[in-house]
Image (tube, rainbow, N blue to C red):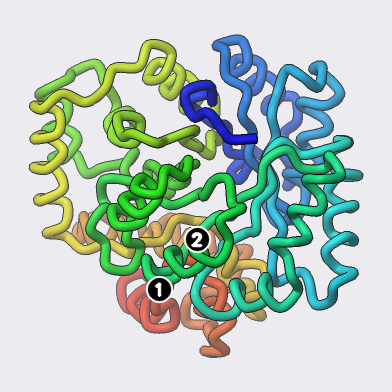
Amino acid sequence: MNIDVTKMPKLGFGLMRLPEKDGAIDIPRVSDMVDRYMNAGFNYFDTAYVYHGGNSEKAVKEVLVKRYPREAFTVATKLPAWAIKTLDDRDRVFNEQLERTGLDFFDYYLLHSLEDGANYDVYEKLDCFNWCLNKKAEGKIKHFGFSFHGSPELLEKVLDKHPEVEFVQIQLNYADWNNQVVHSGRLYEILLERKIPMIIMEPVKGGTLANLSPDLEEMFRAVRPDKSAASWAMRFCGSLDGIGTILSGMSNEEQVEDNLATFADFEPLTDNDKATIDKVLEKMLATPLIGCTSCRYCVDGCPQNIHIPDIFGAVNTARKFPKDNRPKFFYGSLTGYSGKASSCIECGQCEAVCPQHLPIIELLKEAVEKLEN
């Protein structure tokens, strides 16, 4: 069954950065956010085996399965290469996901974070593409695809080898369009040319494009005074052809409302809007920032319990505003319950799992210089 992107909800609810209370997902609050999103006519929810330490999939049961009829929503989740070592592990993880969510089938199922090297090799070694097709034949999966963090060359190789793939999820935003690591623009062109539907992740680059420096935000407000910086990033993605759903990892009610305002009556970018984004991007790139998207894959396996994405957020703020003491205050609070950047033992675990391929060890040394000294 081919996916008709025109019938997919333009805005997807990413369950990766949910609000928490007392160290656990705040289910009542998330339920209210889900209700607002659903009442606006949207119904695509994206989770994964590893999000919130596995609790994101459990939240699906609480906020959706127990509260809405099955036909009212669609759920996407993912098989992680790093959690499977044998052929039997595929079913073990899949059955655990069904149990966590309380679902009988998944509308969209993805091989998680396919990239050059280890992850892709695991999926091929354990015959995961054919396994997913078998799950689809059993009615346990409606649509099969993968999320992608690799090179354009690998994407073409995989698509040539696996024409059965129905959709691909890629990182895409205006800041990464010409990024020589992320390759958003080239990946988009490959998929569009092949007429493969796209799901978009990181449209605001982990919040980076929603929290711009005042001078950049003013450039947007001068053109559209009533629109947020995040709405510009979302409209950039929404104005492209071949896009099914654009995921937003909504962490609070304000983000839900802002996204609904953008997509409830969607307005594509005008030529003037595109020119404004080009000007903002030109000025933005003059101050290089760490391209961390806060996926937090690096945190779980860190032997020193270093909250790397949070530290990098402080470093980016320090880069943009070198005279501002707030990054140091934030860092002091953060490292009261987690490891310091100077605690790094350079084991490399973080760099091995980073989808952005960041030189994390060297960047932590910068953090020591900017935030500890």
Query: In this rendering, which labeled residue sits more in front, label 1 or label 2?
Result: 2
Which picture quadrant has residue 76?
Answer: top right
Q: Is residue 308 visible?
A: no
State the SS at label 1.
loop
The residue closer to the viewer here, 67 or 294, is 67
Residue at 61% x, 53% y is 164
Residue at 43% x, 49% y is 206
Which picture quadrant has residue 336?
Answer: bottom right
The residue closer to the viewer here, 195 or 315, is 195
- Residue 258 placement, left or right of 76: left
> Residue 78 at x, y = what percent?
69, 52
> Residue 338 at x, y = what percent?
61, 67
At label 2, the amino acid type is Leu
Quarter of the picture holding the N terminus: top right
Quarter of the picture holding the C terminus: bottom left
Q: How many marks?
A: 2
Instruction: Provide the residue designation for mark 2.
Output: 159
Q: Mark 1 and mark 2: span between their CA atoms?
A: 26 Å
Query: Can you say whether 186 is above or below 356 in the image?
Result: above
Residue at 54% x, 25% y is 8
Query: Can you say whether 328 is above or below 51 in the image?
Result: below
- Residue 22 placement, left or right of 358: right
Is disc 2 surrounded by few (<14), some (14 to 19) or many (20+) residues within 10 Å?
Answer: some
Is disc 1 surrounded by few (<14), some (14 to 19) or many (20+) residues within 10 Å?
Answer: some
Residue at 30% x, 29% y is 239
State the SS at label 2.
helix
Query: Can you say whether 366 is above or below 43 in the image?
Result: below
Q: Which mark is residue 358?
A: 1
Which of the two labelled residues, at mark 1 and mark 2, occupies the earlier sequence position?
A: 2
At label 1, the amino acid type is Leu
